[in-house]
Image: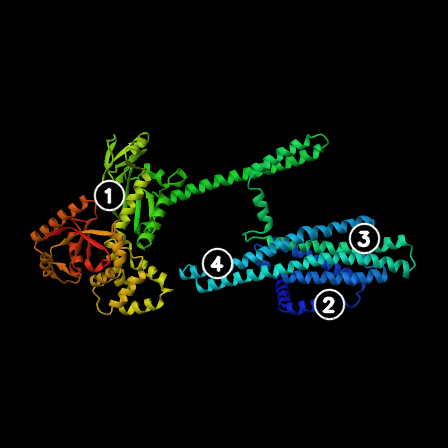
Amino acid sequence: MAVTERNMIIRSLNNNSDIIFALAIVGIVIMFIIPMPIFLMDLLLAANITLSMVIILVSIYILEPLDFSVFPSLLLFATLFRLALNVSTTRLILGQGYAGKIISSFGNFVVGSNYVVGLVIFLILVVIQFVVITRGAERIAEVAARFTLDAMPGKQMSIDADLNAGIIDDEMARQMRDKIRQEADFYGAMDGASKFVKGDAIAGLIITLINIIGGLIIGTLQRGMPLADTARTYTLLTVGDGLVSQIPALLISTATGLVVTRAASSDNMGVEVTRQLTTQPKALFIASAILAVFAFVPGMPTIHFLILAAVVVAIGYLINQQYEKLKKEAEEMEAEETAVRYPQKEEISTLLKVDPIEVEVGYNLISLVLPEQGGDFLDRVAMIRRQTAVEYGIVIPPVRILDNLQLEPDVYRIKLKGVEISRYKIEPDHYLAMDSGLSTIKIEGIETIEPAFGTPAIWITENMREEAELNNYTVVDPPAVMATHLTEIIRQHAYELLGRQEVRSLIDNIKEDYPALIDELLPDLLTLGDIQKVLQNLLWEGIPIKDLVTILETLADYGAKTKDIQLLTEYVRQALSRQITSLFQEDDGNLYAVILDPAYEDNLGQKLEASDQGNYLALEPQEARMLIEKIAREIQKLLQQGHQPILLTAPLLRRPIKELTYRSIKELITLSYNELDPRVSIQVMGTVS
């Protein structure tokens, strides 16, 4: 029942807070005009001290400046309240020679009834507030306001970019924009509000001087008091009043500095300061040693410095012990995570899932994978995924890496959708050396075949590495061998890794910028599966799909005319003519290729037949074999001259010939005349007749 009543009271205060604040402002204005009774003045002075303490404590506990966004307005309120108190206390001091118990206590007890000491303390407080804290806070607020305003356009553009990329939604973008606007408003307001603190310090100094002069005049001329008594009475009261005002003012100034210098953090200031000052136990040990040296300097208080040195070294020791404990726990947790990442006994549920790409490593190769053992293969895999996204325009699914005790210790294998695609044996503590074609001597080592491209190579020891490099051998370490092998496997099978879900993600990524295109294409003209098949056809022949907008625009143009996937693919390839030409154009600007004899090409064109899978060449086995052999001979001549294996054909024959020769001549690049940039110079290096 008590909790319910308390909640009702808090809710009632919140609902009426605007009325309370308005009455407080009106009350402050009244204080400038109407004399206040002494009892009420004591209460208001105590309230002023309480308010300043609450403000500085709240400033310590905030995580970022916007958590205390009302501070500039509150600063104006506190300054106005303090000035109203100064006016009221001045009226009481000069009118009655007494301004309440709080001011008397500060004048007699705090400064020991010595008004000279009190005056000096008051002046020191004013200097500290005005010269040190206020000026620094004012400068910081000014710079922060300027930098915040200058950074606004960049932050807005960053939010727009994240929104367009689909990283954030509209609601989150609106909240982030509101936060940027609030930051600009806050620092702009703080830049102006800091002037209140500066003016308050000046006003306090002037008011104190006026009170002393006015008190001397009233005491000696009006009341006939001796000059010494007058100086003692009015100066003590004035200094007490000044201290009562300046201490809360100092707290408010400090709070201003804390707020404007506070950077966004996950913890309050006390936690942050403690954590950051104790992150280096060595610093505490060094400080303790220096304190111990000071203890034995002649004239220094030995006991004091020894006590401080002991305290600091004890704190450093405790912190160091805690760090060692946390480090040990982290290593144990990392070992557990490693066991989870490389499980030997998997749960039944994980066995039901088929990963798109897996790399299984033997026991001896685990050190090449685990970062804690110096392996960098995981970083290389991340780079492979980024490189594939940049080159081909697709995001490869995460590569699962695990150990397999059933493999030979030095063997790894690459699996695609649960099926082994390739495996290779690594020679431990060796490097793979490959002849670049410029080598003059043959080095000794374990002969092997490079796994990615099938070229001859040699495993050499580390002490032979420098000799091999000097003799123009290309030398790579085992992680690079694995990474290159995996990269080539991904390139060859990228079309198999592009599923409907991946296509949907690619389309969603551009839908924000091209909504009309997507709405026209899907689902009326083509299905998601149709688009997937076209993209797979492109990737199957090594054509990147980065220019997805051009691809979809072309499909939207021709999707209403035909649903033939092969024909749609050819239309897309023609639209990508500049990109395709740039892929196969050599450094001299020419494209070197083999062509079909026109009569032979016409003969093959007459043997095209249609099927559900598109056109194909209906050739007798002997005729098909002869065609493949003729193409292979001409392509071999092209390769011997250092050119890419390119065959130019008529558009209708391009795809059927590619499918016919794929198993026998996988490296063959089949292009049609229509998908080449008209500006490229074609150099015919052979004719298949």
Mark 3: few/some/many CA within 10 Å (<14, 14-19, 20+): many
Residue 549 position in % (x across, y down): 32, 62
Question: Which SS class for mark 4?
Answer: helix
**For residue 382, side relative to residue 176 (left or right):** left
Residue type, label 4: Gly
Name the one closer to the observer, 639 or 51: 639
Check contact, mark 4 vs mark 1: CB within 8 A. Answer: no
When the figure is inspected, residue 279 is found, relative to residue 631, above or below; the finding is: above
Distance between mark 1 and mark 2 Cα atoms: 87 Å
Residue in the image at 66% along x and 60% along y: 75
How was this image coloured?
Answer: rainbow
Q: Report the residue marked by disc 3.
A: 107
Distance between mark 3 and mark 1 Cα atoms: 92 Å
The mark that comes first in sequence, 1 or 2, is 2
Question: Which SS class for mark 3?
Answer: helix
When the figure is inspected, residue 252 is found, relative to residue 461, above or below; the finding is: below
Q: Report the residue marked by disc 1.
A: 453
Query: Taking the image as drawn, is residue 102 in sight?
Result: no
> Quarter-wise, where is residue 442 in the image?
top left
Residue type, label 2: Val
Which label lies toward us, 3 or 1?
Answer: 1
**For residue 22, side relative to residue 460 (left or right):** right
Task: Give the number of the disc on residue 154.
Answer: 4
Q: Report the residue marked by disc 2.
A: 29
Check contact, mark 4 vs mark 3: CB within 8 A. Answer: no
Q: How many marks?
A: 4
Residue in the image at 63% along x and 54% along y: 137
**For residue 92, side relative to residue 621 (left or right):** right
> Quarter-wise, where is residue 485 in the image?
top left
Residue type, label 1: Phe
